Image (tube, rainbow, N blue to C red):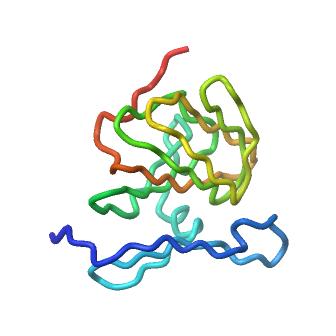
Amino acid sequence: MKKLVLGFVIGVSLTGFLPATKGDAPFRLIYLSEKGPNIVTPDDVLSKVASLPEAGMAQVPLVLTAGMSVGAAVISGSEPPHRHELSDLAVLVWKGKGEMRLGQDRIGVRRGDLVIIPRGLIHRFRNDNRQLSVGLAIFSPPLKKGDFVEVKE
């Protein structure tokens, strides 16, 4: 399989950064692959997750380039506190709301918030929503096996 990606663009409609109101269209991830343009919404990601494991979190890989990887995390409860030693991380809250722990600080986050997490910083997302939350996770350089380091508290 060719690993060549002809181009890459993350497209987010402006409605993703405005408070959600009835009738808002979901904002989208848009990227160009060797097969042509692709458009992904949070509902597309949710349709790929048949059921969540006991931990209450599922990951859906979306895009891989030489410089970054993009995936979605579907969370019903809370992910464990962890850090990434090799990659910086940007998390866009794509759907839902919750609490993001960054080091010792905790902050409420909601749809449209973008959280920047430098490598090595302990972090965790906890869903405060009755519905599933979906986060778009952008790792640079790309996430590699073993880079998810769970932290015991």
Residue 115: x, y in percent? 61, 47
Residue found at the very far right of the displayed protein: 21
Give the answer, above or below, for where 65 lies relative to 12. Answer: above
Give the answer, above or below, for where 103 lies relative to 89. Answer: above
Residue 54: x, y in percent? 52, 35
Give me the residue at 21% from left, 71% from top. Answer: 4
Give me the residue at 53% from left, 34% from top. Answer: 55
Quadrant of the snapshot with the N terminus:
bottom left
Quadrant of the snapshot with the C terminus:
top right
18 and 47: which is toward the camera: 18
Give the answer, above or below, for where 60 lies relative to 126. Answer: below
Residue 7 lies in quadrant? bottom left
Residue 87: x, y in percent? 38, 42
Give me the residue at 41% from left, 34% from top. Answer: 84
Residue 24 lies in quadrant? bottom right
Q: Is residue 78 left or right of residue 122?
A: right
Q: Is residue 35 left or right of residue 152?
A: left
